[in-house]
Amino acid sequence: MAIDDVFARLEALATGLGAYRAKVIPVDRVETDVSFRELCAKNVCGNYGKCWTCPPDVGEIDALIAKLRSFEYILVYQYVGTLEDSFDFEGMMDAALKHNELTAAVRAACEKEAFRDRLYLCAGGCRICPVCAKKTGEPCRHPGEALASLEAYGVNVSRLAAAADMKYINGQNTVTYFSGVLFSI
């Protein structure tokens, strides 16, 4: 099967599962920046040091960027949720839940692919467990399934969107989440 056919099949798989858009691009088009780790350290999201797949526990940033660069391609996909208004926090959380469900479905489908290697990265960090084991002083309950965020790996998501010919912001009263499947054939 030609590589373009593989890409088209993966893109159709993601959109068929509910992604708004999906595109495979070479990993060398993914822009990374170590300063995203500094944003994590400011604990804007509240998960710094409280989740095994978030900084600082996810790993040293240069090693994570090197790991990302070890792959050939990334399937970038996005979920766009509709909000009542720009203050609709409940709508944002509902869209995040739907994006997490999409990410799980894409992951399950990609596990059937004959990739040499793969890495799943999501929007905003792992949400597999209702309460991360890190918060209760336990080891990760699902180390083979836990998901780190694109940002934890230093990915500039707005530039990733542009590289994949996607909009980072999809209009008024929407929220957009991105995930990616890194893989090598």
Image (spheres, rainbow, N blue to C red):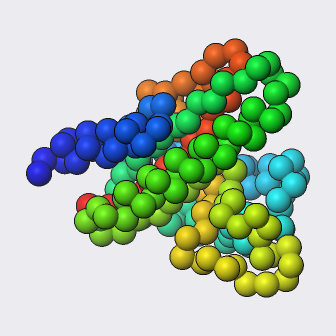
Q: Residue at x 32, y 39 (%)?
A: 12
Q: Is residue 104 above or below residue 30?
A: below
Q: Position of residue 78 (x, y in %)?
A: 52, 37
Residue 56: in sight, yes or no?
A: no
Q: Is residue 183 left or right of residue 78?
A: left
- Frontmost residue, 97 versus 158: 97
Q: Residue at x 67, y 37 (%)?
A: 95
Q: Position of residue 89 (x, y in %)?
A: 83, 34
Q: Residue at x 82, y 27 (%)?
A: 88
- Frontmost residue, 103 versus 52: 103
The image quarter containing residue 14 is: top left
Q: Residue at x 80, y 21 (%)?
A: 86
The image quarter containing residue 29 is: top left
Q: Position of residue 182 (x, y in %)?
A: 43, 56
Q: Residue furthest bottom?
A: 138
Q: Position of residue 35 (x, y in %)?
A: 73, 49
